[in-house]
Amino acid sequence: MAEIAPLTPLRYDLSRVPGGLGTIIAPPYDVISPEERAVLAARDPHNVVHLILPEGEGDTKYAHAGELFAKWQAERVLVRDEEPAFYRLDQRFVPPGGDAGAPKLLRRGFLALVRLVPFSARVVLPHERTLSGPKEDRLKLFRATRANLSPGFMLYRDARGELAPALAEAEPIAETRTADGVEHALAKIRRPEAVRAIVEGIARSTLLIADGHHRYETAVRHAEEVSAAHAGAGPRAEHRFFMTFLVNGDDPDLVVFPTHRHVHSLASFSFDALLRDVRALFEVQELPQGADAPAILGALSRAGSRGPSLAAASRDGRAAVLTLRADGADQLLEAHTTLGRQPAVLRRTDVTLLHTGILEPVLGITPAAQAAKTNLWYPQNAASALAELRAPAGKGDVLFLMNATPVAQVRSVAEAGEVMPQKSTFFYPKVPTGLAIHTLDPERSI
């Protein structure tokens, strides 16, 4: 099963950071817009965004990140912890789009090192397809900095909450509140008995990647390169481990949110034709003209209790909920040319029904076009996406709104050795970058 270890990371010396923790952390690199990068970079000259999204043309930006990383260490802005520990992170938040005055949810997890193993070992399980471009970009950054700057995010199994007492033993380090309203509290777990209990508890579980598939695959490839160049590196050399944020996937308070699909730039599109063509597979419930996002999502949620469902909204104010037909659903799926080729564990997931049952055969968006995002945007705010679609100069052709994919269903797919379409899940809040940095020196052991 999974092998984890405590970190002895590089961390910011907060006594040298006038604005505190909140001024030097950043969201994961792949959700930072150019405008947000500029804001983060201006917040503090040592904000981690300067490392994860470095400045420069072409490949020179990676060398710049490496030079900056070395400089910050020489200046003692980044210093090595003296002892190994796990780093617990509590995040209190209101769900996206929720009432700001509602009680906040708590997500508790911890930063740890996970031994890198290929997916074929069935210890670390992916659940989404990945793209080559982001992996090549991150690999160049790994090489230039020799560091794992951004943590992954994985889920372990602990249905009885046996690790909770050990995770409660934490010494506070710092707290901050980010612009999205999320409250972050970082603490250190270092008592040997607590550390040992956590290591032994995780060893009974496989790990499901919630976020950071590209980062993990890149780390595996980088470790193979380093091992080939340093044949004498020890079995616990730093480069053989990946820094990740671990959360109990069996926690009933763990929430996952949907990522929607906004289809655009089709050669031709007719909402009437769409509804006609999907009736062979779906029951179609047309909603009142002008139904807004809450009304559509409410109808979709109710339909989801009856079976796999999704909603479609048009530019002219129409919307419909599509629910897999109950009359011989299995035979329908088997007979459907594209869906019939999918493994059974995938065929009834909402996102697979959309991608393989509608986007490809009905709208003609090929898997290659999906991977290249030629005709797809992936919004997470349903109200904003619907407003963009229905604006006077409407943006896009049709918006597909989704229910969240339950964690149990994600794990079932992953444990069957299958993967879902890209961006099938949206785990919120994101895990900040800059809390800790794991170096990848083959001459250092953990």
Image (cartoon, rainbow, N blue to C red):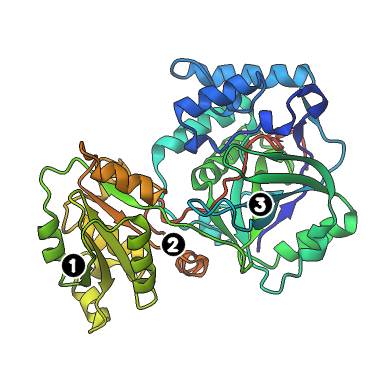
Q: In this image, 28 relative to 352: left or right?
A: right
Give the residue at mark 3.
Answer: 92
As drawn, the residue found furthest toward the bottom would be 327
Q: Earlier in the sequence, mark 3 or mark 2?
A: 3
Residue 277 locus on image (x, y percent): 12, 64
Secondary structure under the numbered disc 2 in the rendered image: loop
Label 2 amino acid?
Ala
Residues at marks 3 and 2, CA–CA distance in whole angstroms = 20 Å
> Image quadrant for the N terminus?
bottom right
Q: Is residue 290 above or below residue 164?
A: above
Q: Quadrant of residue 10?
A: top right
Q: In this image, 279 relative to 94: left or right?
A: left
Residues at marks 1 and 2, CA–CA distance in whole angstroms = 26 Å
Q: Crowding at label 3, few (<14), some or many (≥20) Cα neighbours within 10 Å?
A: some
The mark found on residue 404 in the picture is: 2
Residue 299 locus on image (x, y percent): 34, 68
Q: Earlier in the sequence, mark 1 or mark 3?
A: 3
Residue 416 in sight here: yes
Give the residue at mark 1.
Answer: 337
The mark found on residue 40 in the picture is: none
Q: How many marks?
A: 3
* Contact between labelled residues 3 and 1, with CB atoms less than 8 Å apart: no
Q: Quadrant of residue 307?
A: bottom left
